């Protein structure tokens, strides 16, 4: 695999790690630690995304990126499925971070499946 492609994929994994950290600390930063459902959702998904990003930084596996896509999609729909969509700041935090996770992970999968696109 060309080193430039590997560097690009690593940057996507770093992006996901930063997004995981942002998600994990969002209950404190945005101020919704008292709202247990969205706070625990942010903490659990943040830890899962962070663990996957760290694992992918060491050895890339396409399945990890697909799990990230699923977690990102979960973040997008969870405000409605878990009943906290009425809190605009909390809902937007989950949706925006979910969209960014999906985008970074889909980008990594696309790069993996189209290695010659960087030539």
Image (cartoon, rainbow, N blue to C red):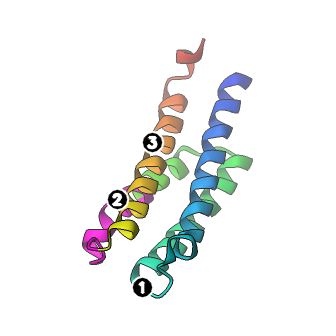
What residue is disc 2 on? 76
Main SS of the magenta part reads helix
Residue 87: percent from the left, percent from the top? 32, 73
What residue is disc 1 on? 35
Task: Describe the element under mark 1 as helix, strand or loop.
Answer: loop
Q: Residue sitting at 64 percent across and 44 percent down?
A: 60
Q: Earlier in the sequence, mark 2 or mark 1?
A: 1
Q: Earlier in the sequence, mark 3 or mark 2?
A: 2
Task: Describe the element under mark 2 as helix, strand or loop.
Answer: helix
Q: Is residue 32 above or below residue 8?
A: below
Q: Quadrant of residue 9?
A: top right
Q: From the viewer's side, name the closer residue of 87 and 25.
A: 87
Q: Earlier in the sequence, mark 3 or mark 1?
A: 1
Relative to 2, 116 lies left or right: left
Q: How many numbered markers are drawn?
A: 3
> The C terminus is located in which quarter?
top right
Q: Are marks 2 and 1 in contact (CB under 8 Å)?
A: no
Q: Tell me which segment is drawn in magenta.
A: 71-86
Q: Are marks 3 and 1 in contact (CB under 8 Å)?
A: no
What residue is disc 3 on? 103
Q: Residue furthest top?
A: 119
Between circles 3 and 1, the one closer to the viewer is 1
Category of crowding for the residue at label 3, using alpha-carbon neighbours closer than 10 angstroms: few (below 14), some (14–19), many (at least 20)? some
Q: Is residue 6 above or below residue 25?
A: above
- Mark 3–mark 2 Cα distance, whole angstroms, equals 12 Å
Q: Is residue 109 above or below residue 25?
A: above
- Mark 2–mark 1 Cα distance, whole angstroms, equals 18 Å
Residue 17: percent from the left, percent from the top? 63, 54
């Amino acid at each position: 695999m060309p080193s430039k492609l590997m560097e690009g994929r690593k940057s996507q994994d770093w992006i996901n790690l930063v997004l995981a950290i942002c998600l994990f600390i969002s209950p404190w930063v945005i101020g919704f630690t008292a709202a247990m459902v969205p706070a625990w959702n942010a903490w659990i998904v943040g830890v899962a995304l962070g663990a996957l990003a760290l694992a992918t930084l060491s050895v890339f596996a396409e399945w990890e990126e697909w799990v990230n896509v699923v977690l990102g999609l979960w973040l997008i729909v969870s405000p409605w499925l878990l009943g906290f969509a009425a809190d605009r700041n909390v809902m937007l935090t989950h949706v925006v971070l979910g969209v960014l996770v999906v985008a970074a992970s889909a980008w990594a999968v696309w790069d993996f499946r189209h290695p010659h696109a960087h030539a």
